[in-house]
Amino acid sequence: VSTSFQRDLVSLVPKLRRFALSLTGNAADGDDLVQSACEKALRNQAQFQSGTRMDSWMYRIVQTLWLDDLRKRRVRGPSLDPDDHDIGDEGKGARLAEDRMMLASTAAAMATLPEPQRVVLSLVAVEGLSYKEAADVLEVPVGTVMSRLSRAREALLPQLGMSRGGRQ
Amino acid sequence: MMTVMDKDRLAAFVDGELSPEEAAAVVLHLADTPVDQAYVDDLFAANEALAQAFGAPLSEPVPEAIHAAIMGPSAATNVVAFRPRRALARSCCPVCCRPPRPQALLWGRCRPGRLLRKCWTHARPARR
């Protein structure tokens, strides 16, 4: 018999995996991260205040665990071999080669960003959170979210081949 | 005389952080400031590239190991593929939902309250 907490958590997994993938840059590390985060969430279930947003709470757990993990053992960086990105990906080898190349190059660009900037950019650009929601997840002021975002884009746009505008 | 707009404000526009009135003012500004329009196009394109590059998990089933970690191993016998529908990415004029200006890149998502690219009719104030 599953609780509604468990069911809600399962339904968040696709978004958490996307978030974790954007942080770690590869599917295997991302899934490890999501699994640890879910285990931690279950252990700390009592700390979750029902009525508050579970997704924000889970994003916070994922990014905290990721930063802890990096600090503990500077994990291997995102692999540049696109084939590695399909490990642990449930037979999704069917994904187009172009998609894998795009993941590899975007992940490599993301990997050059300092971690706090990467987290903010993921939450806003990938997960679609508002600045306020991202600030709540990270427990920082909205101004901090904006400045990290702006620095992240400053560094990332040229790497993605997007700085035609001349506004640099 | 062309005056550029603060980059944070342009970013806030792209991220859907502005009120409809504020966003409308940015749209008018962009119509007269190609350099800022190009920057906004870059920001939309970057957001889209990021969302696409990391988007695969949204159309994949929950991996068994994660499902089992949450539900307990006994519940893992019948893992149902969870396929949330991806938000329909489209780009259209928020006023009339027609395609945007021809030279505009097709980036960004159209949602209520989120002012994106306008079509020719609505992108500029009426000229006499």
Image (cartoon, coloured by chain):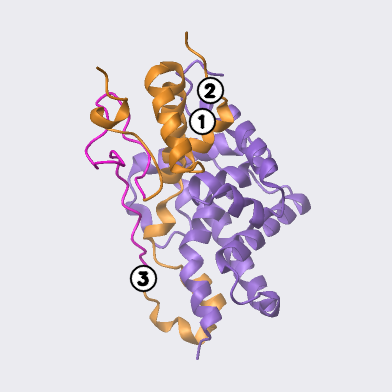
Chain colours: A purple, B orange
What's the distance in space between the residues labelled 1 and 3, CA to CA? 39 Å
The residue closer to the viewer here, B128 or B24, is B128
Q: Are marks 2 and 1 on the same chain?
A: yes
Q: Quadrant of residue A96?
A: top left
Q: Residue at x 69, y 59 (%)?
A: A65
Pointer 3 residue: B81
Discs 1/3, front: 1
Is residue B42 positioned above or below B63 on the image? above
**From which residue to which does the magenta span run?**
B82-111
Amino acid type, mark 3: Ala
Please provide percent x and percent y for residue B94.
31, 42
Residue to which mark 2 is pinned: B5
Q: CA distance from mark 2 to mark 3?
A: 46 Å
In magenta segment, residue A36: no
Q: Earlier in the sequence, mark 2 or mark 1?
A: 2
Q: Amino acid at mark 2?
A: Met
Q: Measure the C-alpha gap from mark 2 to mark 1.
A: 7 Å
Query: Which residue is the site of mark 1?
Result: B10
Badge 2 vs badge 1, beta-carbon distance below 8 Å: yes
What chain does mark 2 sit on?
A: B
Would you say residue A93 is visible in this rendering?
yes
